[in-house]
Image: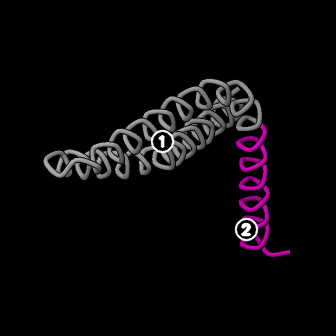
Amino acid sequence: MSYEYEEKVNRNSGNKEREDYVNHKMEKHNRFYKNIYNVLYTINDFTIAIWFLIGSILFYFESLKNWGVTLFVIASFQFLIKPTIRLVHEVQARKHYGNEYDHKKANSKRA
C-alpha cells in the first residue's frame, strides 16, 4: 500500500469515528434537551394560536381589520421561530461535540 492511500484510509476512519462520536453525543443531548425545547415549542404554538384567534375576531369589525392583519403577520412570523430554533440548536450542538471530539483526540495523541 502506498503512503497516500494509508493516509486517506486513516483520515476516513477518523471522520467516521468523529461522526459516530457526535451522533452518540447528540442522542444523549436530544433526550435531555427534548423536554425543554418541547415546552418552548408549545408556548410558541400557543401564542400563535392566540394571535390568529384575536386577529380573526378583530376581522369582524371594519375599524379593527388593520389590527387583525397585524396579528396575522406577527403569528406568521412566529411560524419561522420554531424551525429556526431547531436548526440553530442542532448545528451548534453538532459543532460543539465535533470540537469536543477533536480536543479529546488531540489530547490523547499528546499523552
* Marks 2 & 1, CB-CB < 8 Å contact: no
x 72%, y 47%: residue:
18
Q: CA distance from mark 2 to mark 1?
A: 36 Å
Residue 85 is labelled as 1
Mark 1 crowd level (few <14, some 14–19, many ≥20, 10 Å Cα)? few
Residue 32 is labelled as none
Q: Find residue 107 and report its image quarter.
A: top right
The residue carrying mark 2 is 8
Mark 2 crowd level (few <14, some 14–19, many ≥20, 10 Å Cα)? few
Q: Nearer the viewer, residue 22 or 33?
A: 33
Looking at the rendered structure, the kind of residue marked 2 is: Lys
In the image, residue 44 lies at what x, y percent?
A: 47, 35
Q: Which residues are magenta?
A: 1-24
Q: Nearer the viewer, residue 79 or 93?
A: 79
Residue 53 is covered by the magenta coloring = no
> Which residue lies most toward the front here?
61
